[in-house]
Amino acid sequence: MVRTGPDQPPLTEGHAQEAGSHDFGLASAVELARALDRLPEVVVVGVEAQSFGWGEALTGPVADAVPAAAAEVLRVLQR
């Protein structure tokens, strides 16, 4: 899980990338909002994939992590 907001440090280089305005990722958008002093708290909950093959089922570790990620989403939404 990644949590950031106006009072948090910038996302690391592993999250943000240099790109043009037509190739903006989430981390780049977050850092632009921070630079413009318009950044709210941002919470990203996810499960890191192990492979991206076409039509493949979730791997065991990924499938095992989904319930915890879903529970975290619910916890964040209930605050």
Image (spheres, rainbow, N blue to C red):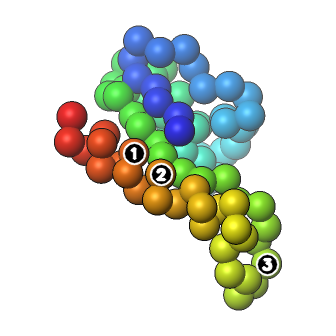
Circle 2 crowding by C-alpha within 10 Å: few under 14, some 14–19, many from 20? some
> Could you tell me the amino acid type at mark 3?
Gly
In the rendered view, does 61 fall on the left or right side of 39?
A: right
Label 3–label 2 contact, CB within 8 A: no
Residue at x 70% of width, y 68% of height: 60
Q: Is residue 4 above or below residue 19?
A: above
Q: Position of residue 65 (x, y in %)?
A: 57, 56
Give the secondary structure at mark 1: helix
Label 2–label 1 contact, CB within 8 A: yes
What residue is pinned by disc 3?
Answer: 53
Q: Is residue 34 visible?
A: yes
**Quarter of the figure with the C terminus:** top left
Name the mark nearer the viewer: 3 or 1: 1
Residue 48's disc is: none
Q: Is residue 63 above or below residue 4?
A: below
> Could you tell me the amino acid type at mark 1?
Glu
Q: How far apart in space, not on screen, are marks 3 and 1 (Cα)?
A: 27 Å
Circle 1 crowding by C-alpha within 10 Å: few under 14, some 14–19, many from 20? some
Q: Position of residue 42 (x, y in %)?
A: 39, 34
Give the secondary structure at mark 2: helix
Out of 64 and 52, give the one closest to the viewer: 64
Q: Is residue 66 above or below residue 33?
A: below
Residue at x 53% of width, y 38% of height: 1
Residue 68's disc is: 2
Give the secondary structure at mark 3: loop
Out of 70 and 9, give the one closest to the viewer: 70
What residue is pinned by disc 1?
Answer: 72
Residue at x 60% of width, y 26% of height: 11
Circle 3 crowding by C-alpha within 10 Å: few under 14, some 14–19, many from 20? few
> Could you tell me the amino acid type at mark 2?
Ala
In the rendered view, does 44 fall on the left or right side of 28?
A: left
Task: Classify residue 54 by image quadrant.
Answer: bottom right
